[in-house]
Amino acid sequence: MRDFLELSVSAAASGCIYGLVALAYLLMIRPTGIINFAVGEWAMVGAFGGFLFLSRIELPYPVGMATVLGFMLLVGWATERIAVRPLVERGAPLLAPILALLGMLVVFRESISLGFGPDPHQVPEPFGFEHHKTWIIAAVIVVFAAVWLFFEKTTTGKAFEAVSLNRKAAALMGINLSRVTAASFAGGAAAAGLAGLLVAPNVSAHYLMGVPLAIQGFTALVIGGVGRVEGALLGGLLVAFAEQLTVRYAPLPAGYAQGVPLLLLMVFLLVRPTGLLRARA
Amino acid sequence: MRKVFAVALALFASSVFSQETIKIGVITDKVGPAKPYSEPTLEGIQFGASEINRAGGVLGRKVELLIEDDQGRPDISATMARKLVDAGAVFILSITLTPATQQQQNVTLEAKTPQMTPMNSGDTLTTQLANPYFWQTGPLGSVQIATLLSHARSKQLKRVALISDNSDLGQLLARFFRKGLEASKIEVVTEEVVPRGATSAEPQMQKIRAANPDAMFMAGVLTPENVLILRAYRQMGLKFPIHSSYNLSVPQYMSVAKGLLNGITFVDAYDPEKPEVKKFEADYRKATGKLPYNIHGYGYDGIRMVAEAIKRAGSSDKEKIRAAMQSLTYSGVMGARGMKYVFPEGKRTGFDPNGMVVRVYEGDKQGRVIHVGQK
């Protein structure tokens, strides 16, 4: 029983990280239809932001965290301006910005690798390592509650929903599509950056940390469903629990359990491609 | 006419200049998974080359490094080796991943070009291919486990746990560890793997706790995954001792695993109290402003050995260099005090099997040597 309780907290913390990355995907996919696989690299940039502002400059944690999030908003906005908007304005097919963003993935990774070197860097926790999982869970619940309220209760949030339902109709209703797209990328980058900042004390900030997070987040998104914010969190938690319970309890040889999330991904793509939670009508 | 003459003169001059250098190829990984090891090794090679050149070079000629990046990819590594052979390299140093170094050997064997890896630890590099032009001077994975086991024997271990990551090298080392433990009649009660990119190692550590081992051996080579293991170990309040592969000798642990390291023993090829190490560290710091660490030493010893072999060969003829390299005896920065690299005929792994040391973390600092060799 002790093992199960310990594992539940550990899996919940990991699931929250995956959920945040899934949220980053979702914030961009909903209004634009663009799958941005560079979210993992955004998480990596967020982790290095934590190293820079919290470890090297030694800002107080709330100030450092706010600085990282502000910087990530800028990164997302700039990415949209550089890699997405020019293609959309020229009427390029949807695949074009997806490929351009894959190119940005390499740009982010190599820039960090050149700027900070290949070695991992330490990022501090705000409340010590014994309480870090609790902090991750609390912070992610607050973020998801805020995003849910934004979409459900604010006019701007409803404008996002309108764009995701029908871009042309939303434009005819006077909604500024460019602004919504830019804001969705900025929000996605902030969510991914926060995931990186939260996970970095566990795994340190290193330039290869992005791709695994992008894969776990994408799996969580497919399982939870693209249609609803809470689906991202649900998917993240399911992936993490499946991962960690399999390692602990399944009678599989060491190393085999890591294939379980991919198996889940394939099952959902085949059986329920809309994910567990469907979008509201 | 004057212009033609000037161009011809310039071409002639550049040709004479290029003949004056001794070209040594280096295949490194600048972007792939070996980068954290390749980069400091390359810095050690570059420092060694500049030191050699400042002292007049080899055979009165400057050493010129031709550096190629294979991204740690075996599929392009052989092409890089071919490029270096074509560019006139008389020796190739490989400081990339073990499988990539293996691929390069197909070229160096065919082109009869001496090749050495000063940092790869895979045991199979000199056994898979009978390549008399290839040498390995880093300590083998099997030597690491034998040294750790020699230290562990005094602890009367009966049942141990083994944990690693899922990288190629991590899995290779885990196999060596398991083989060595079983040969020593020590039971491996559980073997766990933390995959690359994991965000928790608690399930694996719970299984190890349930198996109640006398000690845990860490064979992983990925720093973030090893940090996860150490966090789970401390968080769960586990008390069994940890014995680690050389990966914990990388100084980055002192910052990324702060507060998690005290009492952990690790195998290393670097004794900070050795006079050669003290001189190397002082000279490197003076030249670059940075303090080197063990991995820089691998590169430094590598280029110094290559230069010594060329000097003893008395020419840049590759066959003569091969013969000189095979008969070389060299005392360098790496290894326990008094250790010498030797290559008895037919043997191409130069690191003395008794040349490794076991050190212990004292607080967050890499502390004293507590054991030497396999005796």
Image (tube, coloured by chain):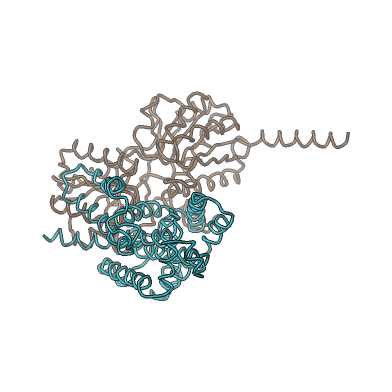
Chain colours: A cyan, B brown
Q: On screen, B31 above or below B184?
A: below
Q: Residue A275: x percent and y percent?
A: 30, 54
* Camera-side residue of A190 and B166: A190
Q: On screen, A204 above or below B334?
A: below
* Location of residue A30 by image quarter: bottom left
Instruction: Residue A202: tell me if it is visible.
Output: no
* Camera-side residue of A46 and A36: A36
Query: Extreme left residue here?
Result: A1
On screen, residue B219 versus residue A28, left or right, reads left
Q: On screen, B86 above or below A212?
A: above
Residue at 66% in and 33% down: B19
Residue at 37% in and 59% down: A21
Q: Residue B290: x percent and y percent?
A: 50, 58
Q: Quadrant of the C terminus of chain B?
A: top left
Q: Quadrant of the N terminus of chain B?
A: top right
- How many marks overall? 0
Query: Extreme right residue here?
Result: B1
On screen, residue B74 versus residue A216, left or right, reads right
Q: Residue B312: x percent and y percent?
A: 53, 31
On screen, residue B236 versus residue B312, left or right, reads left
Q: On screen, B20 above or below A269?
A: above
Q: Residue B77: x percent and y percent?
A: 48, 35
* Camera-side residue of B36 and B360: B36
Instruction: Residue A103: tell me if it is visible.
Output: yes
Residue at 44% in and 69% down: A159
